């Protein structure tokens, strides 16, 4: 049973199609004898007649789709994309960790407040106050012990609820799924060339994304700068470049012999430069993981990350035996696209990636950190320490739950955007709900007796998990 199925009330099944409840006709109701009962896990069962409801205070409510402001990033496939740039047919990653095709994009003018949320491990985000977030409410805990609070929060399992952004609290947990999409593609083509998608190709691409660049303005050379101590890595890289692309290479050093430059100098270099730029981006700010790599199986992604780490990674374990709390790997980049892709790629390996800011980070850039035993997915020689679990996340088979560390408010005047896609969820950067259906209209209004005014006086038990509606026509719905 999946985690999503376990959240359904007993006797309920998840419908795959929209159910028209009035398909058999509208039931005839005897308003004199009809009663609305509120019972179950309540302190005081209540009963209301139709006359009671008509005499109750009426609530008027206006609500329209509100979602992300302009420039809000959504995890797309193959790369993150600002929400205003999404189009029907674009792919986004849903709360199930799979990619879904967008059917429709909607936008409107919005004047009001936005809620900012920063969860541990993930980048910050902004959204409208009523935007639904998939969350686990945090246990109040004792003292300042985050580990104890985390244990108490998940002691009875994962109890997820949809929470408005403006109702989130510090310490609540948001959800990031493990990326599950794996392509069946075995070959990638570029013009007339065909390449097998294997660990060798992924490893070289990892090197290029980390350190490779066109070493001349006319694109007649590709350079891979390494440190002077990476002679063995330089040898392996040269062998792979020749095996995969038939590329002739040379090695140069600077005048202080602190840098090794592996340079492709063969006649095919202009074609190779164009191919790498097509796959991996034009420059350092636009570097990205090619789609055929990020959609590959975990073995291919691991080979890419190993190459990336050799080119632009850092860990105390490489130069010396790390101290107790130095068991980490950092992957640095100045590309926002690449930073988000690294988070997604690592999740496919079951690895939580932490976006950190520290003195060793790229200026105005990103450093993606992997800690503890999980770092062995990238650096197999990383030692494992026996120590108290102080990692601020909770892992399940489906993904990771990260605690909210900061919430703020700010005013906004401009466009807000939403879209329709199967599953009605997205990563922005954690799981939120896309609030639009094909029946959505701007600024609809409701009028009637509010549900809280009916169930509140009954005294709902803290053990209650669902509200079940038992309808006159025999249907029940959570």
Image (tube, rainbow, N blue to C red):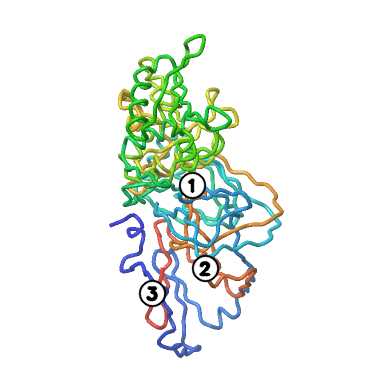
SS for tag 2? loop
Judging depth in this view, the residue of 273 and 298 nearest the camera is: 273
**Disc 3 designates what residue?**
476
Return the disc, 3 or 1, that comes first in the chain's sequence: 1
The image shows residue 9 at horizontal and vertical percentages of 35, 64
The quarter of the picture where the N terminus appears is bottom left
Figure quadrant of residue 369: top left
Assign a secondary structure to mark 1: loop
Query: For mark 2, what is the residue?
Result: 437
**How far from the left and from the top, in percent, is residue 280?**
48, 39
Location of the C terminus by quadrant is: bottom left
**Image: 59 above or below 164:** below
Which of pointers 2 and 1 indicates the residue nearer the eye?
Answer: 1
Between the residue at mark 2 and the residue at mark 1, the CA separation in whole angstroms equals 25 Å
In this rendering, would 310 be left or right of 417? left
Residue beneath label 1, please?
79
Residue 58 vertical position relative to residue 352 in the rendered view, above or below: below
Does the rendering let one see residue 380?
yes
Callout 3–callout 1 Cβ contact below 8 Å: no
Q: Where residue 260 sits: x, y (%)?
A: 45, 17
The residue lying at 43 percent from left, 37 percent from top is 353
For marks 2 and 1, the one nearer the N-term is 1
Crowd band around label 1 with a 10 angstrom C-alpha radius: few (<14), some (14–19), many (20+) = many
């Amino acid at each position: 049973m999946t985690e999503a199925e376990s959240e359904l009330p007993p006797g309920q099944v998840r419908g795959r199609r929209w159910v028209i409840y009035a398909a058999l006709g509208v039931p005839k109701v005897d308003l004199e004898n009809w009663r609305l009962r509120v019972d179950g896990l309540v302190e005081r069962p209540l009963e209301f007649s139709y006359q009671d409801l008509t005499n109750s205070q009426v609530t008027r409510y206006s609500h329209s789709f509100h979602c992300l402001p302009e420039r809000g990033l959504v995890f797309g496939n193959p790369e993150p994309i600002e929400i205003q740039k999404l189009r029907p047919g674009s792919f986004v990653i849903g709360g199930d960790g799979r990619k879904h095709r967008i059917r429709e994009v909607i936008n409107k003018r919005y004047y009001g407040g936005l809620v900012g949320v920063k969860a541990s491990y993930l980048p910050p985000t902004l959204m409208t106050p009523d935007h639904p977030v998939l969350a686990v409410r945090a246990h109040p805990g004792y003292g300042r012990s985050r580990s104890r609070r985390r244990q108490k929060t998940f002691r009875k399992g994962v109890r997820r609820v949809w929470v408005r952004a403006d109702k989130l609290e510090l310490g609540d947990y948001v959800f990031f799924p493990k990326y599950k999409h794996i392509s069946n593609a075995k070959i990638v083509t570029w013009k007339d060339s065909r390449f097998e998608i294997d660990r060798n190709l992924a490893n070289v691409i990892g090197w290029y994304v980390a350190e490779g660049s066109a070493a001349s303005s006319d694109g007649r050379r590709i350079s891979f700068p390494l440190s002077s101590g990476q002679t063995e890595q330089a040898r392996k890289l040269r062998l792979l470049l020749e095996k995969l692309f038939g590329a002739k290479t040379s090695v140069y050093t600077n005048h202080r012999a602190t840098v090794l430059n592996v340079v492709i100098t063969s006649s095919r270099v202009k074609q190779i430069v164009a191919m790498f730029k097509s796959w991996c981006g034009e420059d350092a700010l636009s570097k990205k993981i090619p789609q055929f790599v990020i959609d590959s199986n975990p073995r291919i992604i691991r080979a890419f990350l190993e190459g990336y780490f050799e080119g632009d990674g850092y860990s105390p374990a490489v130069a010396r035996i790390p101290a107790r709390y130095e068991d980490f790997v950092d992957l640095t980049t100045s590309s926002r696209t690449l930073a988000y892709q690294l988070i997604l790629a690592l999740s496919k390996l079951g690895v939580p990636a932490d976006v950190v800011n520290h003195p060793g980070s790229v200026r105005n850039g990103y450093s993606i950190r992997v800690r503890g035993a999980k770092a062995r997915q990238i650096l197999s020689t990383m030692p494992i320490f026996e120590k108290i679990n102080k990692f601020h996340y909770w892992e399940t088979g489906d993904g990771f739950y990260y605690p909210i560390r900061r919430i703020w408010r700010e005013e906004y005047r401009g466009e807000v955007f939403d879209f329709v896609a199967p599953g009605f969820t997205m990563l922005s950067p954690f799981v939120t709900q896309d609030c639009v259906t094909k029946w959505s209209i701007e600024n609809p209004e409701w009028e009637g007796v509010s549900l809280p005014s009916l169930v509140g006086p009954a005294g709902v038990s803290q053990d209650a998990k669902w509200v079940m509606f038992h309808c006159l026509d025999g249907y029940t719905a959570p």
